[in-house]
Amino acid sequence: MSAVALALYVVALVVLFGVRSWVQRRRTGSTGFKGISGTPAEAGWWGGVLFVAAIVLGLAGPLLAVTGTVPADPHPALAVVGLVLTLVGFTATLAGQTGMGASWRIGVDEAERTDLVTTGVFAHVRNPIFTAMALAQVGMLLLVPTWLSLAALAALIAAVELQVRAVEEPYLRRVHGGAYVAYAARTGRFVPRVGRDASNPAEARIG
């Protein structure tokens, strides 16, 4: 299963970051990559660093398992579940990226203004791409049960929490104001109905 996991991970990296960025550049003139912003004194910087660490660790897990450097012997039933979760997670990630259209970005550029996407799956979850990525990494952990895969999942969750709470949500409030406040009040952060921001109930009734 380690070889299958490695192949899936490499294909996902190529499609979700390489091909997706190429398509984004052709459509908008920008790859969508904004890089790691801020300094080590800021939460957003750590979010970016941890995200990169999660990708590297996620790749290292199956790679070292295939070479026999790190042992990985998943239970057959758990491996099947892991394979399904990985495929669903990667597919949902691509669907979320596609659903964002021209607004898709990795990172935030304070000088940039993109449309607020609230349709499709985004009508139910504010950050479905991050949710799907975490689901895929859970699947990878079941496929390749090593400390590297577990570390990748932990780094990804930490990165997502920092990026969303410290960078993206404040940015979206500044850019979209009441429209985002209302959206956040009625829509879950990572899963439907969970993590809604009801700090402004009056705004929540808009739309």
Image: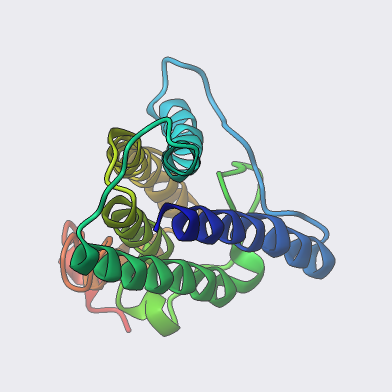
52, 43: nearer the viewer: 52
Q: Is residue 136 visible?
A: yes
Q: In which quarter of the image is the C terminus?
A: bottom left
Colour scheme of the picture: rainbow
Q: Which residue is drawn at 28% across and 55% down?
A: 138
Q: Which residue is drawn at 70% across and 56% down?
A: 18
Q: Residue at x 42, y 15 (%)?
A: 41
Displayed quadrant of residue 86: bottom left
Displayed quadrant of residue 136: bottom left
Q: Is residue 94 left or right of residue 126?
A: right
Q: Residue at x 42, y 32 (%)?
A: 50
Q: Is residue 145 left or right of residue 103?
A: left
66, 180: nearer the viewer: 66
Q: Is residue 142 above or below residue 37?
A: below
Displayed quadrant of residue 192: bottom left
Q: Is residue 153 above or below residue 151?
A: below
Q: Farthest top residue?
A: 41
Q: Quadrant of the N terminus?
A: bottom left
Q: Is residue 202 left or right of residue 184?
A: left
Residue 156 horizontal/vertical position (percent) = 36, 42
97, 63: nearer the viewer: 63
Residue 74 horizontal/vertical position (percent) = 25, 54
Q: In this view, does 204 lie above or below 56?
A: below
94, 26: nearer the viewer: 94
